[in-house]
Amino acid sequence: MKDSRLFRILYYVLERGKATASELADKFEVSVRTIYRDIDSISAAGIPIYTTQGRGGGIRLAEDFVLNKSLLSKAEREQIMVALNGMNEVNSLHESELLTKLSALFKIKNTNWIEIDFNSWRDDKFYEKLFNEIKSAILTKNIVDFNYFASNGEETNRRVKPVRLLFKGYDWYLYAFCLLKNEFRYFKLSRIKQFMISDDKYADDFDNVVLKKKVIYQNMINLKVKFEKSAAFRVYDELPGLITKDKEGNLYANINIPNDYNLYNYIFSFGDKAEVIEPQEIRARIKDKIIKILDKYKT
């Protein structure tokens, strides 16, 4: 309790420039004698706080005082403020009061330099409930159950020990120990359905678990793809590496991609705006798939 009061006294004096002992006593509901003892404790900690007598007197801090001046350089204090400002935007846990206090203590202006919004433009509430339930299960160490729709179309019932929430590549994932597969797995939140927190607890200590890398595909293939200029926004957004352009404005890029359903899903996501130039066997397979699609729309 005392340590908390000492910090609040320090912040109060910093914020106002000075304060009287009686003012602080009323503020923190203690005696004036207790306030003077607190001032002595603050001073003993190496913080230059002092009392002046007479008209205009009171309890003050040295004008050039900055919290932890001897421990943190100006650059380090600025880095702390930048990091906390970014964290405030990311986790939305209302640390604005903390930022305001540290800004005053460090004597650094808190610049509003970043804004992050993980919600989709649809402005739906899909993630809010699921995200909070997963967070709760991780903190309380409850096993959870859900149906999961894998990218290959398979639906499975999963029972997992939730470890961590991860935001990567524009999507949220649950990293968990899967009791079905008996290993750590990633689960994309948008593919989790019928999520339930069970009453069963787990005792494993996963605090220091290092997230394993995503599966490295062995069967990769390099495509040369032509894109119409109207698809340029996606090409530049999504494809790394060299992108060339012809006289008509069409774009050409090489894509290294798993040689499985991911390949066709990705190419077809461009509709008629993309054409695989090479290799020829992939062109032939795409043609076969297009013929099968046309068969479905004959009537």
Image (cartoon, grey):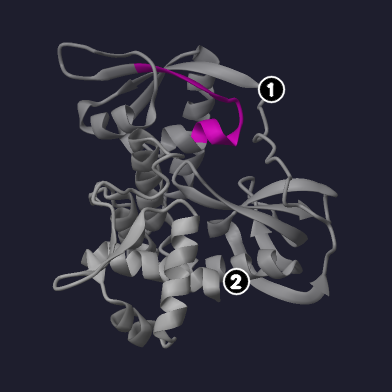
Q: Residues within 10 Å of mark 2 (few under 14, many from 20)?
A: some
* Residue 212 image position (x, y, % from top left): 70, 37
Where, quadrant-wise, is the C terminus in this rendering?
bottom left
Magenta stretch in the rendered image? 253-264
Q: Nearer the viewer, residue 22 or 249?
A: 22
For marks 1 and 2, give the CA distance. Answer: 35 Å
Pointer 2 residue: 133
Residue 272 in sight: yes
Mark 1 or 2: the one toward you: 2
Disc ID at residue 20: none
* Residue 151 image position (x, y, % from top left): 61, 46
Q: Residue at x 57, y 18 (%)?
A: 221
Amino acid under disc 1 = Gln
Is residue 259 inside the magenta stretch? yes
Q: Nearer the viewer, residue 227 or 71?
A: 71
Of label 1 and label 2, which has the lower sequence position? 2
Pointer 1 residue: 218
Measured along the vertical axis of the image, is residue 51 above or below residue 245? below
* Residue 14 image position (x, y, % from top left): 29, 62
